[in-house]
Amino acid sequence: MSSERRLVIIFMGALLALVMVAVYLLQRNVEVDAYSDRMVLLQEAGRLDARLDEDLQRVLSLQLLHYDTLMETTIALRENAERIAGPEQGLRGSIDAPGFDALLDDYQQAVGQKIQMLERIKSRVALLRNSLHYLPALLEQLTGESSHEQLGVEQGLLSALLEYHLFPGDENYRNLLDEIAELTLPVWEQEKAEFLDQVLLHLTLSVSLRTEIDEMVREYRTQQSPQLLQQLREVFSGNYQRQTARFYNTSRLLFVLLFVLFLGMGYLMLSLHRARRSSEQTLQQLHDAVESISEPFVSFDAGDRLLLWNRKYAELYPASAALLEVGTPFAELARLRVENGDYPEDELEELQLTKLLEHHSNTEKAEVETLADGRHYLVSNSRTSEGGIASVFVDITERLETEEQLGIAAAVFDTSSEGIVVTDHNNCILAVNPGFTQITGYRADEVVGKSPNLLSSGRHDAEFYSEMWRSLYDNDIWEGEIWNRNKFGEVYAEWLSLTLVRDERGDVVQHIAVFSDITKRKQDEEKIRWQANYDAVTSLPNRTLFTERLKASISSSHREEWVTALLFIDLDHFKMVNDTRGHAVGDWLLQEVAGRLAACVREADTVARLGGDEFTVILQDVGDADSAARVAQKIVETLAEPFFAEGGDIYIGGSIGITLYPNDAWEDEELVRNADLAMYRAKEAGRGRYRFFTQSMNDQIQARSRMEDDMRLALQQDEFFLEYQPIVDARSGEVAHAEALVRWQHPMRGRVSPFDFISVAEDSGLIAPLGWWVLEEACSQAAIWHKRGYHIGVSVNISAKQIRLGLNVEDIVSLLEEVGLPPQYLTLEITEGLLLEKTEKTLRWLNHVREMGIKLSVDDFGTGFSSLSYLKRFPVNTLKIDQSFVRNLTTDKEDAELTRAIIGLAQTFNLEVIAEGVEEVDQLTFLKQNGCHFIQGYHYSRPLGAAAFSDYFQQSNQSVIVKLDEERGA
Amino acid sequence: MIGNRLNYKLLLHLARPALLIGGALLAYAASAQPMKEPILPISPPVFSSDELREIELGRQLFNDKRLSHDNTISCASCHSLDKGGTDQRPTSIGINGVMGTVNAPTVINSSLNIAQFWDGRADTLEQQAAGPVHNPIEMGSDWDEVLGKLQGDKEYVARFRRLYADGMTADNIVRVIAQFERSLLSVGAPFDRYLRGDEMAISDQAKHGYRLFKSYGCVACHQGRNVGGNMFARMGTIGNYFIHKPELNEADMGRYNVTRAEEDRHVFKVPSLRMVTHTAPYFHDGSVEKLEEAISIMARYQLARRMSDKEIAAIRAFLESLDGTLYQVPK
């Protein structure tokens, strides 16, 4: 019904538009208004022209007292003629008729002539009036005291004059001349000659004026202005009538056309009669309806001027509501609203205005307008039948907000990597998201309308699914892991969340399934598990798995009463390969080794890598020691074979320690320790061989263990003490420095060699408390000396193990502050080995030490893989030449060269250099000659107790002591 | 037809309506004679608010010297309202001190004239206002120059914009000046009060002067509200006024300059006598200093009459009573 009505309205509108366009086009040609305006002008001209003629008559009547009314006519006529002849409101160029403009010129000229003639007549008449008025008075003066006869003459004259003026003809003119001739003055009244002259003057003047006026009136009357006006009117109106006739013909044709059209519409109209009636009703109630529209409504006419609106619309723009007025152009309204702040404040007001105008002119587009109160309106514009615009404003603030939320939801739906499936109450798929496609491979068009069963992998039985549905309908939600099959037939695991959507009645309307592919997660778990148990480089079991396997082996061996062997393999020279050929080659080598090891053992045996170059092999149920030895020999041989690497063959080798269960030990840890120890023995024995764990090795372990116990006790009972070996400046012979050396006096063992107990301390971790005790002791002693005025530094050996165990630089600094020793008097001696570690952590530690002002020296320099690079990298102050070089300095040419090189190196890097173990003069001489001035060794002194050191210092450093004494004395 | 013995006055009275045409016009002519007096009073004008705005703007432009080429001359320079709307010089002085050829006529009551200038060459006040701007010896400027200067005045531009859609243009400038000039009316003259019935408004001498003014025939030309200004007449109707002038210039030709018709030689617009006591010197050439002399010359050359000093004094008294005060535009 409503669409029908709309159809009719549209159709009517179209017709109306057609008619309007036709009429408009015709009107444009005819210009009725312009025509009537001009006709009014012409009529006015005729009227004024006639009035001018009347005015002339009034002038000629000699009765006009003043010319003001005449003047008005003249001015009006002048203006009218001017306007008629003008191009704009006038007729000039208004019609396309030949000679029309010339006619206008003629008319204008005629009017001008008339006015000019009238003006001339006006002035003549003024004079004539004066003469005629003056004559009787003059005559009276002339004849005032004269006889009756005289009077007769005078009367005759005046009569003749009047007669002439009334009926100007030759006869009357002659009569008048006769009367004038008779006018003579008696001799006795010659004194009045002057008056006579005057009379004659005015008489002749009036006559000549009379003649002149007659002439002018004739000329005035020759002006053809009314005729010209009539012609103008005829030509103009004729032209108009022709145009009108054309217009009427066209209109008639159009109306016939329209009539036919309307006839054709008849049937349609009839059937839509009811709709039209209601539409008419609507039309009648339009205003009320518009007012009652709950949405703001406005319409503009074709010229974009305000036409119709309701109260709601006015309320939209509260700041400029008062400005609403029919006919206000939209641009004006928009400008005022922008100015009055009906729109949100915007720096670019002009821009906003432009936008508003642009949008208004583009009626096809519905636009969103945001007003000052922050509400959003959807403005739906439509063209009205007369070409205007009707707009309805719908408050879409809430809708926008909802849309925004929906947009977010849609974005989540579209972008979620999780698959989302929505099904109806029959479990038919309604929608799936791209995530679904990503996981399952099915596009939306392939699955919509189908059951999600198509994904079923067949891995779960019917019971599983019925349980799932039951749980879902009970709890409205179900979650779980499920195996499905994708489009390509691949089975994958997914984590599935099912949710029910119920309507108000509680009936299920939709199911929503959200799932993620957890196949990868499962793989990841696998990978993590693998990484936890296997070595990344060689893919062999790592320490963890190895330990597990070993334990398993032990338990099964125990059960089965098997003999099981554990082989501990350490590669020889692997570190060098790593250092010289790089880690990539190192890793490659490890993989090769792993391959060769695996080739040497049975399938059931375990080959593991514990880290670095340490491998283990578990030979389960090996039978006897010989079998284990055969395998070990095989491994030794295979590792001795060259490895063909890029950039040159590599020769390494392996040292193997073997231990047997249950012969050597029953516990896994013990077995590992045994094998390790045996491996060390093999290395000590010259590498590239295997050794069985023996009882003596066990004894050695026991001994170390006992020593460990003794050391713990010794730390408690202060069995450790320090000795200080002077470091002397060979140039002056004075003591420059002291190296603190730890000593242990055991009540039972006697003096224990540091060589023995330090390694035990390092292995057991006792090095941390012991090392700290040494630091405390040495620093306190140095502080005492310092206070005494002996400005000598003290060196303390620091083990790499100590640093690894957490020796804190801050603690050392606190210690120095506590005892009162400036940090530059403490030197920490580290080994080359520590530098070789090259770890960031070590570097940071060393740098920290240096930042605190504590000095660093490298002990036993030259024994390790010293290189220039680490001297550059590490912030050391001092190098100590190892005593092994010094010992053979005078006999071994190579050692001499090396020593010289070390000294040169130190000089290059601006480092101090100290030679250790100097015992002979020759050695001293050599060192001094080559620029090494700091000497430590028996040549000067063995290590001394603190008191003995003080004595030695006083002897060597006489000058210092004297100076100190002087200071004390003073 | 009419007897010789008929009384002349009676004859004249009878003949008057039928003097030139038939009896058909008699009735009309009689009815078209409502005014008893040839001189009419001037009533205060009524203006709309838009017109008042135009007048106010016109007043400023009337006094604005930027209308002249060198910014020295305004309309008011030659038409000072303090001097009866004239400059009280024989002929006016334009830019660069150049002397003009005619006596500046009064601007007061000029809207009541049939045309403007002595020779009536301008039909309207608008046409007149544009004249001096372009006259090289008066303001010596042109519209491009004037507009160029006035565009710089924001106040003007804004006020023109308020009045006219096309803002400040040459046409609109002359329009407001003309509008202002339409407001320049002399009102409340004693004689006007007399005309309205206040017998005491003017002196007996003035009343006598008015009677003489009528009986001598001065009133034949100097009539209407403006006491002149609504017609043209030859200077020297009876005697040749110009015969005594040693040299004639173009201005002396009068309306001949407009129509090029021999009979318009020395024809001028009849000047208004409304402000006559203030507008000395007199005549188009400003050749006469004294009003009495001007009256005497007029009687002689226009009327071929001779007036006594007493009569002249009486006419003068009458002329003085024509003097009104300038209409004050309501603010």
Image (tube, coloured by chain):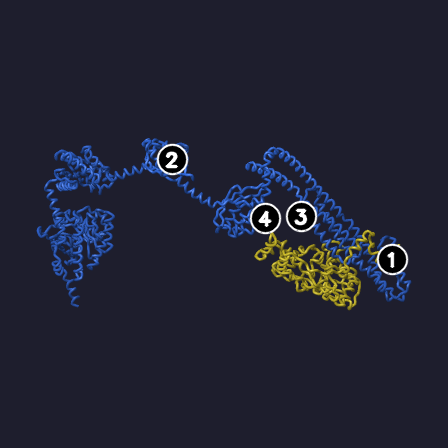
Q: Which is more toward the observer, A860 or A705?
A: A705
Amino acid at circle 4 = Val
Q: Which is more toward the observer, A947 or A702?
A: A702
Q: Is residue A516 left or right of residue A133?
A: left
Give me the C-alpha separation between circle 4 and circle 2.
59 Å
Q: Are marks 4 and 1 on the same chain?
A: yes
Give me the C-alpha separation between circle 1 and circle 2.
132 Å
Image spot of residue A670 (x, y percent): 15, 41
Give me the C-alpha separation between circle 1 and circle 3.
54 Å
- Crowdedness near tag 1: few (<14), some (14–19) or many (≥20) residues, C-alpha within 10 Å: many
Classify B299 as above or below A758. Answer: below
Q: Are marks 1 and 2 on the same chain?
A: yes
Quarter of the figure with residue B52:
bottom right
Image spot of residue A43 (x, y percent): 72, 47
Q: Label 4, on which residue?
A: A326
Image spot of residue A765 (x, y percent): 17, 48
Classify A611 as above or below B74. Answer: above
Q: Secondary structure at mark 2?
A: helix
- Give the mark, 1 or 2, whose residue is nearer the N terminus: 1
Q: Secondary structure at mark 4?
A: loop
- Give the mark, 3 or 2, whose residue is nearer the N terminus: 3
Q: Label 1, on which residue?
A: A159
Which label was assigned to residue A717? none
Q: Secondary structure at mark 3?
A: loop
Per the rendering, the colour in which chain B appears is yellow
Amino acid at circle 3 = Gln
- Give the mark, 4 or 3, whose residue is nearer the N terminus: 3
Q: Are marks 1 and 3 in contact (CB under 8 Å)?
A: no
Which label was assigned to residue A437? 2
